[in-house]
Every structure is written in C-alpha cells, then in structure tokens.
Amino acid sequence: MGLWQLNADTLARSRFVLSSFAETFASLKLLHAGVGAHPGEQVWLRDHLPGYQGLLAADPVTGALVRAGLGRSWIADFFCPTQTDRESFAETVARVRETRPQDARANLRVSLAGPLPAALERDDLPERAARVLEYVWEETVRPYWARRRRVLEADVVARTTQVSQGGWAAVLDALQPGRTRWLGENRLQINLHENPPREISGAELLFMPVTPRAGWASWEEPDRYAMIYPCAGVLADHGGRPVPESLGALLGPSRAAVLTLLGSPMSTSQLTAVTGQALGSVGRHLRVLLDAGLVERRRAGRSVLYSRTAAGEVVVKAAGLETHGPPVGPETPGPRGENDIYRS
C-alpha cells in the first residue's frame, strides 16, 4: 500500500483547498472513463462526452497522450501538478506547458510502465497536454464552476467540523473508504498501490475535494503534497436529481429542495451552499418546515443541525424520492474564490 509518514505538526497545519485545476483534472478522468457514477454525472457526460471524443478523434496524438498520461495506476507527473492557493487555473496550466519535453516523455514512460508509442516520441507533448486541460476547463467545468464551488464548500465545511468533533483519524478514513486510512504511528495510507513510503513531515499537506467520483495523490517534492478526494455523493449528485413535481406543488420547489436534502443532518450554511438559495430564504423554509413538524433541529457544538422527522420521511417517500444528506457541518460558510483555503 502507498504510505505517507508525517508528524503531528504537519497534520495540524494541513488545510482544505478548493482547486479549479483538480476539479478540471477529475473531469478529464471522468470524460476518459465515459461512465457516470450517478445521474448528475450521466447528464453531464451526455452533454460533453461527444465534444470531447470528437476533439480526440480529430487529434489522435493528443488522444494517445491522454491515455498514456492517465495510465493504469500512475498519472504522469507533468500532466497533473499540485495547484496552490496562490495560483489561478491558467498559472497551473502554464506549468504544464513549460515542462521540458524530455521530462514529459520520461513521466509518460513511468505512467505507462513501459516504452512510449512511436507517436509520442515528440517535443510538443506539454503544449498538447495544456490545450486539452484548457478545453476541459473552458467547455465542461467553468460553466458550472459557481455551483460546483458551493458544493465543494459544503463538503469542506462538513470535514472541518468532523476534525473538531472526531479528530483527524475519522476524517481521513472517510475520504476514500477502503483506500485512505490513518494507520497510527504517524502513517497515512493514501492508496492500495505497493509503493515505498514517503516521509513528508514538514511539508505542506493539502486536501482537495472534487465533484466527480475520482481521487488521487499529488505532490511537488519535497515541499507540497495533496490528497484529492470525491466530495460526499449526495452533494455532487444533487444537480442531476430534480425535486418531484408533486412535492414541489405541495411545498413549493425551493422548500421541497430543502426537505429532500435533510435525510441526514445539515446546517443552514450547507443548505445555502448546495441549493444556491439565499441564507434568509433557507431560514424561512426551515421555519415553515419546523412549524409543520416535517423537520427538527438540534445543536451539535456551535452548529444547529436540521433533519427530517418521521412525518417528513413519509412526505418525501410518498413523493417517490429518498435521499441521504452529507456529513454534518457547522454554520459558517467559507470564503469563495477560484481556489479557496480552509484551515482545520
């Protein structure tokens, strides 16, 4: 298994980052796989997979580059740099473009675990990699970035609360169940691949959620390491799961959207982030649902959490929709930007 060894100070200084580049690379991986994990991804693929496939069909060299760069168990280093909070998407892609051709080819041999195809023995691979990343960002991610950013913020809010309530071990075990685990004795399992342990004590450690069901480890040795993980499934899927017309007619579409998300406890800030509704509107909807006995609230530390009552469950099930909420989160949303940092 892949292991990172880190001391307590490194873990304590770690932070959550919203990364436009990680979101774009995860979307590239989804386009490459061509199969969605839930209805939201399937709708997105329906809209964007034909254009992506057409791009690669018209440029077989770039198609071969993407296949080689994603590899089977290793991503070519130059293709997927670790974005920092100080970089824009364009600045991160610029680093891809500036890679020396011989380094790009060497990275691809590692990801392929063998020799390069003859078609990739050329010097313009970094430029081609940068162009395909720019295409994925501009055509398939940027139009949705405002909503995706809200979803990622909601996930980060939940994770940071879990750190304060249950400690880092619970959070790390839940990032990618079955793949990531805190093993104790300063050891973090990052994947199931048999690679030598890496000592990262003293380095910058980042955790980056993405909305596609993708995850990987990334680093800029020896200074920066990142774990990219899929955000809570219900958050990523919400855009592809509309509120039933019957429930919307009964409660109003916005209020019904709030009720359907409360299969597990959520805070007002999470509901605001995921639905895109104003904080005041969410508060009014919750008050009506409370008065009707469809939701209940309880305090967890500094947070007030809302969830459906038994009556609320009956209403949702009668409408033919059942959902489960994301992990618990606090009341205060984080700042918003292309790349945002959240301290644990």
Image (cartoon, rainbow, N blue to C red):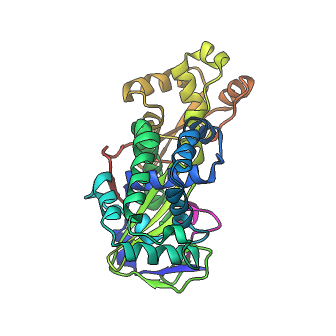
Q: Nearer the viewer, residue 255 or 49?
A: 49
Q: Is residue 161 visible?
A: no
Q: Residue at x 44, y 69 (%)?
A: 218
Q: Nearer the viewer, residue 342 or 337?
A: 337
Q: Residue at x 60, y 31 (%)?
A: 260
Residue 211 x %, y %: 51, 48
Q: Is residue 45 above or below residue 191?
A: above
Q: Is residue 316 left or right of residue 337?
A: right
Q: Is residue 176 left or right of residue 143?
A: right
Q: Is residue 293 above or below residue 270?
A: above
Toward the top, the furthest residue is 249
Residue 337 x %, y %: 30, 45
Q: Is residue 173 magenta?
A: yes
Q: Residue at x 34, y 80 (%)?
A: 222
Q: Residue at x 59, y 71 (%)?
A: 73
Q: State the quadrant of the N terminus.
A: bottom right
Residue 269 x %, y %: 41, 39
Q: State the quadrant of the C terminus.
A: bottom left
Q: Which residues are magenta?
A: 172-182
Q: Is residue 204 magenta?
A: no
Q: Is residue 5 left or right of residue 314?
A: left
Toward the left, the furthest residue is 86
Number of marks drawn: 0
Q: Is residue 200 above or below residue 335?
A: below
Q: Is residue 96 visible?
A: yes
Residue 227 x %, y %: 47, 66
